[in-house]
């Protein structure tokens, strides 16, 4: 793809300038997703993802991405499941990008993972059926899309929902509009020292309306900086708060 | 809708001529589905379906539709679940038409029901969010659509699949193309006395290619007439084969 040398967001990615690549916001991310996630069979794509996730490491921490999941969220999932809840992931990420590793990392099986998707096509190759991933967007699991996807995939209203950006606003709104007790929680990424800090001004993961309206809506805001003793799974870094009895 | 007096399939439905209404095949069914399943919120639609299914009776047998499910299939579902399988329904019917009653009738929860769907839209009504059902088709869960829907909703290939028409062919093909042991079964509706008989010439539920190709593909054909002792749930009709020890 020689044209990627000058075409954004690819040009910035190739130069290693991730910040500039992300300056295009979600449209830029979608463009990258279509370019990198399509034109394979579903089985080929699953293999690519599985190999990548097994080896890829975060450029700053050097840790596997699967180790950089949040310890408090893992504990929350365990707690909910131990109390009879069925847990789902409803992500803006590609549904087939997440499924190969979400069960091992979060204990959530493929059929309980919901995400953005591209169009697929059923084809026969030498008499053997394959599902081809086409370079065309099918569904963006963001904002209003989240309650619609929950309705399509799950078919009932969640009792509790957890988000981190304005892309989750409608999911929390839909969840708390149900009768009976409901829980809506925003995780505020405000810990630049241990993880990263962003909210109103971020291109990706902007949290602005959510911060403003949570108090009057009765939604809980969790500060990663103030409320989380640990951030990452099996976190042994200094700087974490000690486990006080 | 005065125009329905002359417009098919509505004209035939209003005259009570279901056979003629169905002569238009699946396009006629879809037209009826869009006319009757849209322009409500998801909550209103669920209420309509729940009330209908609780009272509607089959015109010939006078029995509730929920009593006219197949006893052998209920036993199959129980048997699979008792052996660690997770069971799903993958139907050409409307996904939100089936969900309100499939858990009670088949033991299959809403999130494990897959079907055809119409477009939905997230709206605020007096500040309260609703999901509107729009009069526009979104997805037809039939033929090639079935493996695509299985891939989207479940994200893994079934080990066993059961169908009754050529609309299930690709689902059975996709299932048996996996590695390891797989099971594909066609239920042949060939019992005019106890239920109904149709295959190659039916407008709805045609089973033609499936009958032809099952033997060479190693798929099992079950004859309702010859292989099923009972047909309907809690069936006490005479004419059923006796339970031989």
Image: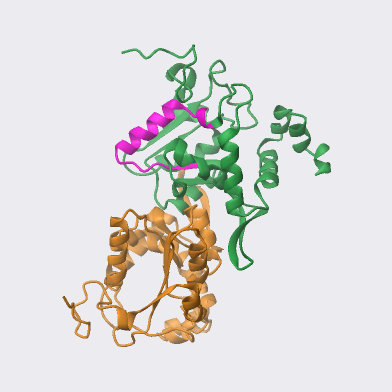
Chain colours: A green, B orange
Residue A70 is inside the magenta segment? yes
Depth check, front residue: B82 or B151: B82
Left or right relative to A145: residue B62: left
Image quadrant holding the C terminus of chain B, namely bottom left
Residue at 46 percent of width and 36 percent of height: A105
Q: Residue furthest left?
A: B245
Percent coordinates x, y for residue B57 in the rendering? 29, 75
Considering only vertical position in the picture, is B217 above or below A131?
A: below
Percent coordinates x, y for residue A88 in the rendering? 43, 43
Residue A179 is inside the magenta segment? no
Residue A140 visible somewhere in the drawing: no
Percent coordinates x, y for residue A210 in the rendering? 51, 31
Left or right relative to A56: residue B55: left
Q: Residue furthest front?
A: B180
Residue at 43 percent of width and 30 percent of height: A73
Percent coordinates x, y for residue B19 in the rendering? 44, 86
Residue B66 visible somewhere in the drawing: yes
Residue at 31 percent of width and 65 percent of height: B76
Looking at the rendering, the stretch of residues picked out in magenta corresponds to A66-90
Could you tell me how many numbered marks the image carries? Answer: 0
Residue at 65 percent of width and 31 percent of height: A203
> Residue A19 is drawn in which quadrant?
top right
> Residue A27 is drawn in which quadrant?
top right
């Amino acid at each position: 793809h020689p044209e990627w040398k000058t075409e954004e967001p690819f040009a910035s990615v190739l130069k290693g300038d991730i910040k500039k690549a992300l300056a295009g916001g979600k449209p830029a991310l979608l463009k990258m997703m279509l370019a990198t996630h399509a034109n394979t069979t579903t089985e080929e794509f699953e293999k690519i993802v599985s190999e990548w996730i097994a080896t890829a490491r975060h450029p700053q921490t050097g840790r596997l991405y699967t180790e950089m999941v949040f310890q408090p969220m893992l504990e929350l999932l365990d707690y909910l499941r131990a109390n009879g809840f069925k847990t789902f992931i409803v992500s803006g990420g590609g549904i087939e990008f997440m499924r190969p590793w979400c069960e091992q990392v979060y204990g959530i099986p493929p059929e309980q993972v919901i995400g953005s998707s591209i169009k697929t096509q059923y084809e026969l190759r030498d008499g053997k059926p394959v599902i081809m991933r086409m370079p065309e967007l099918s569904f963006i699991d963001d904002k209003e899309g989240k309650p619609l996807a929950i309705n399509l995939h799950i078919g009932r209203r969640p009792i509790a929902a957890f988000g981190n950006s304005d892309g989750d606003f409608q999911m929390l709104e839909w969840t708390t509009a149900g009768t009976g007790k409901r829980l809506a929680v925003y995780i505020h990424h405000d810990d630049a020292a241990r993880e990263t800090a962003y909210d109103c001004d971020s291109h990706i993961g902007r949290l602005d309306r959510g911060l403003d309206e949570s108090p009057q809506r009765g939604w809980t805001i969790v500060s990663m900086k103030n409320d989380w003793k640990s951030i990452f799974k099996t976190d042994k870094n200094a700087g974490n708060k000690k486990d006080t009895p």
